[in-house]
Amino acid sequence: MRPGSQVGPGRPGWLLVAVLSVASATAQVVFEATSPYHNIRVEDSGGLRLLTFDGTLQTRMSLRNPLEGHFEYIEYFHLPWLWNTQIARVLMIGLGGGSAQRQWAAYYPEVYFETVEIDPLVVQVAQQYFGVREGPNQRVVVEDGRMYLRRSRQRWDVLLVDAYTENRYGAFIPYHLATREFFELARDRLTTNGIVAYNAIGTLNAWQSDVIGSLYRTLREVFPQVYLFPAQTSQNIVLVATRDSRRRTRLELEQMARVLQTSGRVRMPGFLSRVRALREEPPGHFARCGVLTDDFAPVDGLLTRGR
């Protein structure tokens, strides 16, 4: 839903904001409204359709081809195929403009994909302006993601999490979607070979590295293996947590990626290059980062991303 700023480590996102301001000056406003959660705006600019929440870019989509123009990190949501080649049921928390939903519907129409989104206006916008369609294998539920997991007794092969919220101080991960208790609930709703893929904004060694470190340590409290995949063109890191206790090496994952592409199981172009982004060992300072719990999740400090 939300890309990290494409600026140097440790620097604020003013360069991205400046670029977006220039784009907005020449953009055509397609839709604008305010929900209880966001000011939502849809613009067309330079062949792209843009979705912003409270002035912050969430989604971009090519007007020529809806499967293009998205942010790179979206493609890391295909990584769970490396650990489970028989994925049948996927749950995603967070909709935005539906980049992941469009890809999975196009590349894996046989997979049941359900999305939980808290804001009904976001659902309306995604369906009307970004081509998100419901059908037998695509469903959208309007509810808080954690509440839905608690209420539901369904089992999922994959859980994708891409949820940021905004306030006047910046953007932050909703605390209740980042704690040990949340990840325990997620684990209990996964199948035996279940996988979590979690988008976070930050870097491994500089800007927002404490956020990534705390998420990594919190996931490791619950899952036997956690892998780090930093995006190459934005400050996003996708953390992949598996119930499989065996650690896979980079070589093993690359070999599996080739098999998946050759067989046609994974149909997304460029899959191997995303696998190669793996950071095999976490930075040493992660050991000093705190574990997030329902009693300790500092959303206005550690988890906040200032603009």
Image (cartoon, rainbow, N blue to C red):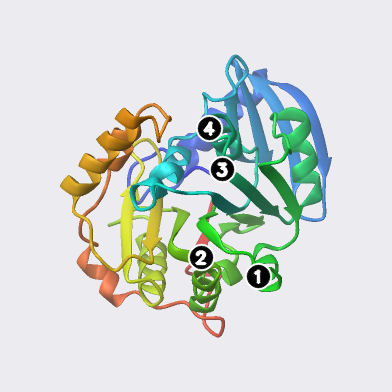
**Marker disc for residue 18:** 4
**Marker disc for residue 153:** 1
Residue type, label 4: Ala
The residues tagged by marks 2 and 3 sit, at their Cα atoms, a distance apart of: 15 Å
Name the residue beneath numbered marker 2.
Answer: 190
| Residue 185, quarter of the rendered image | bottom right
The residues tagged by marks 4 and 1 sit, at their Cα atoms, a distance apart of: 46 Å
- Dot 1 or dot 3: first in sequence order is 3
- Dot 4 or dot 1: first in sequence order is 4
The residues tagged by marks 3 and 4 sit, at their Cα atoms, a distance apart of: 40 Å
Residue 166 position within the rendered picture, expressed as x and y whole percent measured from the top left: 65, 55
Asked whether the viewer can see residue 236, the reply is no
- Dot 2 or dot 4: first in sequence order is 4
- Dot 2 or dot 3: first in sequence order is 3
Residue closest to the eye, 111 or 306: 111
Callout 3 crowding tier (Cα within 10 Å): few <14, some 14–19, many ≥20: some
